[in-house]
Image (cartoon, helix red, strand yellow):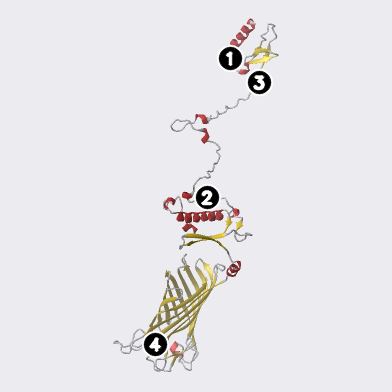
């Protein structure tokens, strides 16, 4: 036995001298006996006393593989320490149980104590954002500085705001509606009785019949036409005693202004415009110096404007504009029965073809439009040529009408200067390349309230073929100004 061990040691020593260090597979067990082998041509010798024939084993060819990168060894949780070198507590890492403190006081957080009920849609309130406060904002008052009533109101508003934001963000999770529930939950109303210093809580009941009579079904049909109406009746009065040191006479003035406009809805017809407006103004005052008439007519105008066009590009449109104006009542000279004008005497029609430009700001407080018509037709009419002389209106003697061709331009400007102050301006000019005339109107409206207003109206007119007036050089320029206060009524669908 001793010699066997020595022989094994000698073989191992000899192999280690010729080759590199032995691998784990240099020693094998063959038929229950321990053998040793070299790396190249290994001679296996039985360590038994019986000498066996030599066995030569050739090593198998192996494809060399790249060396696997060593995995980074993560430090054990037990070896981690904090910045001071103290070992970390393993209980603070890994999955943790969520423990809810049932005794937590959220009064100072202005948060609701119960937020797990099913979401029920009641109504949408756009004022909640302004009513509720943000508890984490430094600009908001601290809950501890509020009394119990202020905290209750703030918490209730914040809770309703959170519910509303949740319903908007996740409408698919809101499965119930208060109006469609088979049995709506009860609502209560709290009232404070100052005589007893008590809060009375009573159940709020809804009258189904009353709600059905008030809540009417919505009419969501398509609206193709938008219309506006503005009517005002304004007057002024002045009383002067007979012995007033400066003299003068008492007088009364009344002004009626009616305006109606209808236009095509641009929401459904963005590439086409059609607009028609009808306006009538009547001004009457008493005539204490007129021995023939009890009153004088200072303003009498019926005017109809129409615009039709197709969009060309951006704010420009191909358009056709028409304007017609006349008066409705008879007008007489001062202290005389001589007629100066009546219905359709004179009358004027103007039709122009050209382009229209429109622009309006985002708030719809300022708008401007310009109609430029290189081709225009103007017609003057004098219906009553027996009592009136057509030559007074620029019509040749012996004719009732006069046709002219030329060009015209019309500018309109609207501005809302303040919440109760409006300004309107209109400029119209026509020329037949021989004579010219134009009207420039200004109107400032002060809306005192819904039914009271004050108007300042100014009208400047130029006419190149106007007849001269004695003792003046400004016969081509005409001006009229009216200041009035009175009642106003408006309605619109726009």
Q: CA distance from mark 2 to mark 4?
A: 88 Å
Q: Earlier in the sequence, mark 1 or mark 3?
A: 1
Label 1's element? Answer: loop
x and y, in percent, of residue 464 in the image: 40, 83
- Counting residues from the start of the chain, the first of labels 2 and 4 encountered is 2
Q: CA distance from mark 4 to mark 1?
A: 137 Å
Relative to 474, residue 412 above or below: above
Contact? badges 4 and 3 (CB < 8 Å): no
Do tag 4 and tag 1 residues touch (Cβ < 8 Å)?
no
In the image, which disc is placed on residue 113? 2
Q: CA distance from mark 4 to mark 3?
A: 131 Å
Q: CA distance from mark 2 to mark 3?
A: 77 Å
Residue under label 1 = 19
Q: Earlier in the sequence, mark 4 or mark 3?
A: 3
10 Å crowding of disc 1: few (<14), some (14-19), many (20+):
few
Among numbered discs 1 and 2, the one appearing first in the sequence: 1
Residue 279 vertical position relative to residue 289 in the rendered view, above or below:
above
Label 4: which secondary element: loop
Q: Quadrant of residue 94?
A: top right
Q: Earlier in the sequence, mark 4 or mark 1?
A: 1
- At which x and y percent is residue 25? 63, 18
Q: Is residue 461 visible?
A: yes
- Few, some or many C-alpha atoms within 10 Å of disc 2 (few <14, some 14-19, many ≥20)? few
Q: Residue furthest left?
A: 245
Q: Residue at x 51, y 60 (%)?
A: 200
């Amino acid at each position: 036995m001793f010699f066997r061990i020595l022989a094994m040691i000698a073989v191992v020593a000899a192999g280690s001298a010729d080759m590199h260090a032995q691998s784990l597979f240099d020693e094998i067990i063959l038929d229950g006996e321990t053998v040793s082998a070299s790396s190249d041509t290994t001679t296996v010798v039985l360590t038994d006393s019986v000498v066996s024939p030599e066995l030569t084993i050739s090593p198998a060819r192996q494809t060399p593989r790249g060396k696997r990168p060593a995995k980074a060894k993560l430090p054990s949780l037990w070896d981690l320490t904090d910045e001071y070198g103290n070992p970390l507590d393993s209980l603070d890492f890994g999955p943790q149980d969520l423990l809810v403190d049932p005794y937590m006081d959220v009064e100072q957080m202005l948060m609701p104590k119960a937020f797990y009920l099913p979401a029920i849609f009641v109504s949408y309130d756009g004022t909640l954002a302004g009513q509720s406060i943000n508890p984490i904002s430094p600009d908001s008052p601290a809950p501890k500085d509020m009394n119990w009533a202020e905290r209750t109101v703030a918490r209730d508003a914040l809770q309703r705001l959170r519910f509303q934001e949740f319903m908007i963000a996740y409408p698919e999770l809101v499965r119930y509606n208060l109006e469609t529930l088979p049995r709506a939950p009860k609502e209560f109303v709290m009232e404070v009785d100052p005589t007893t210093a008590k809060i009375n809580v009573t159940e709020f009941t809804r009258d189904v019949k009353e709600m059905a009579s008030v809540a009417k079904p919505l009419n969501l049909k398509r609206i193709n036409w938008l219309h506006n109406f503005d009517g005002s009746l304004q007057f002024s009065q002045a009383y002067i005693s007979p012995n007033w040191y400066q003299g003068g006479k008492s007088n009364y003035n009344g002004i009626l202004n009616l305006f109606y406009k209808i236009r095509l809805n641009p929401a459904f017809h963005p590439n086409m415009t059609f607009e028609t407006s009808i306006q009538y103004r009547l001004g009457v005052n008493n005539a204490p110096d007129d021995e023939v008439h009890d009153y004088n007519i200072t303003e009498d105008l019926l005017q109809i404007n129409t615009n039709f066009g197709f969009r060309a590009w951006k704010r420009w449109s191909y358009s056709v504009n028409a304007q017609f104006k006349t008066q409705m009542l008879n007008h007489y000279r001062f202290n005389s029965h001589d007629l100066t004008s009546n219905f359709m005497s004179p009358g004027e029609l103007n039709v122009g073809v050209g382009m229209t430009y429109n622009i309006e700001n985002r708030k719809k407080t300022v708008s401007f439009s310009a109609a430029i018509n290189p081709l225009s037709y103007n017609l003057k009419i004098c219906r009553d040529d027996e009592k009136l002389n057509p030559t007074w209106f620029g019509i040749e003697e012996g004719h009732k009408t006069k046709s002219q061709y030329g060009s015209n331009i019309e500018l309109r400007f609207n501005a809302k200067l303040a919440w109760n102050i409006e300004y309107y301006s209109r400029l119209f000019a026509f020329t037949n390349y021989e004579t010219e005339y134009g009207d420039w109107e200004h109107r400032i409206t002060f809306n005192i309230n819904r039914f009271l207003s004050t108007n300042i109206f100014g009208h400047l007119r130029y006419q190149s073929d106007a007849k001269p007036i004695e003792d003046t050089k400004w016969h081509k320029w005409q001006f009229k100004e009216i200041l009035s206060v009175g009642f106003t009524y408006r309605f619109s669908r726009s």
